[in-house]
Amino acid sequence: MSSGTGTPRIPVARFLISVAAISVMLTTAVALFGMMMKNRPQVAERPIVEPSYNVDVFEVQAIAFQEMLSAFGTAQADREVVLAAQVTGEIVELGPQVRVGRAVSAGEIETSPEGQSQRIDPDLLARIDARDYQARVEQAESTIASSRTEIQQLEQQRDNLQRQVELGQQDLASQKEDYQRIKSLRDRGAGSASDLTRALLEMRRYEDAIIQLENQLTLIPHQIASAEQRMASAETERQRALNDVQRTSVTAPFSGIIGDVMVEQGQYVRAGEPLLRLVDPERIEIPVALGMEDYLTLRKTMKDGEYPLARLAENESASARWTGRVVRVAPDADPASRTIEVFIEVLNSEQPQPLLPGTFVFGWISGPRFTDAMVIPRAAISDNRVYVVNDENRAEPRTIRVGRRLRSLVLIDEGLEPGDRVILTNLDIVRQDTLVVPQETITVDDELARQRVATLRRLDAEVTGE
């Protein structure tokens, strides 16, 4: 055991042991690292690869097509009328064919095989009691007869007065001669004053009688004119009554189908009260609304004397069931919807099945034709520019001039050529010279097949007209 002043040996031994252990560990680690470095695999160098993007493309084609303007509306009969009573009275008869859905005739000329023609009377629809109107006819005829008799009497009286005036003037001339003779005798002192006075009074009496006859004769034309006015008024009343008698028989103004019956036999009706509704199902008209651009296109076609063909179906996804033509255009636009109304006419006699009034229909109106035209999807265009795939499969920007818009398609007037492949997808990351890998190639026929409502119709080479 060492003294209290010596150096302690135990801590020094521990230190030396720790240093030796650390040295062994470091030496082992270095040896292991060296072995690992010798056995590591060699890393092959790779070249930098340019990124590429998968895209769908649209193949541009020069095609001939006809634009289709789509519209919808409700069919209505071109001729439909509610027949109303023109006179007041009781319905005393209804025609046997007055039932909803029955056909009625307005009367026509029928020619037999032998060439003989005869007029077929129109069907009677309703008859109103005509007795009151017939009584007015008889009363007016009685007034006419009375006025005619009065005129004849006045004319006879005029002739009599004229003869009396002529005779009176002859008597007055004789009386004047007597007066002059008596006056001449009186002047010579041979006649009496009383004879002269009596001759003068007699002459004055003849003059007064002639004046009275002439006054009566002057009144005759006024009396005749008054009677003629009464007769004319009675004739007018008679004609009105005859018209009312004729109006008591209600017939069809045109051949058609009865749509509604609003009265019954025995019912009292007043003038203007509706009796029944008559519809002509032969000519059907459909008013449809078009936008301003479509209207201008259609208006140009109609100004050239053409009436565009319209194909109609019960909805936009159905096949065309009826055909018609645009026959007229409204003169003004609807300020609320900013559309213009055009009218499509359908003749049921030319249809495989009739188009009924009240049917909602969707229509495709034949628009202008284009030859060697190119269309692309609108989704491919941004700021009048598209990207096409060049021969090196890189994106190449093209500035284009856009023509008429056809819903999801656009007519290209300038900037593309047939065979160009226009990029449709990944347009948010495609830039100039971007490497692309075309996947699906879409044609105009594929795009048309996707459309819910057709905007154009391809024209085959042999199609020359409709």
Image (cartoon, helix red, strand yellow):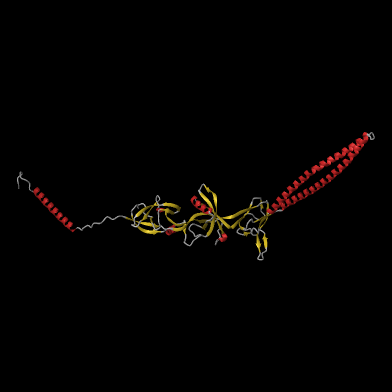
Q: Is residue 378 left or right of residue 105?
A: left
Q: Work out which residue is located at the far right of the displayed protein and give it.
A: 190
Say whether residue 454 is visible: no
Taking 168 as reference, is 458 above or below it? below
Image position, residue 80 (x, y; %): 60, 54
Question: Which of these two is toward me, 160 or 350?
Answer: 160
Residue for point 10% across, 49% down: 15
Image position, residue 314 (x, y; %): 51, 58
Count up the numbered dots.
0
Say whether residue 232 is visible: yes
Q: Quadrant of residue 200?
A: top right
Image position, residue 351 (x, y; %): 55, 61
Q: Is residue 172 left or right of residue 276?
A: right
Residue for point 91% across, 39% down: 178
Question: Which of these two is toward me, 23 or 229?
Answer: 229
Image position, residue 152 (x, y; %): 80, 48
Question: Which of these two is toward me, 392 or 44?
Answer: 392
Question: Which of these two is toward me, 190 or 14?
Answer: 190
Q: Work out which residue is located at the far bottom of the displayed protein and give it.
A: 114
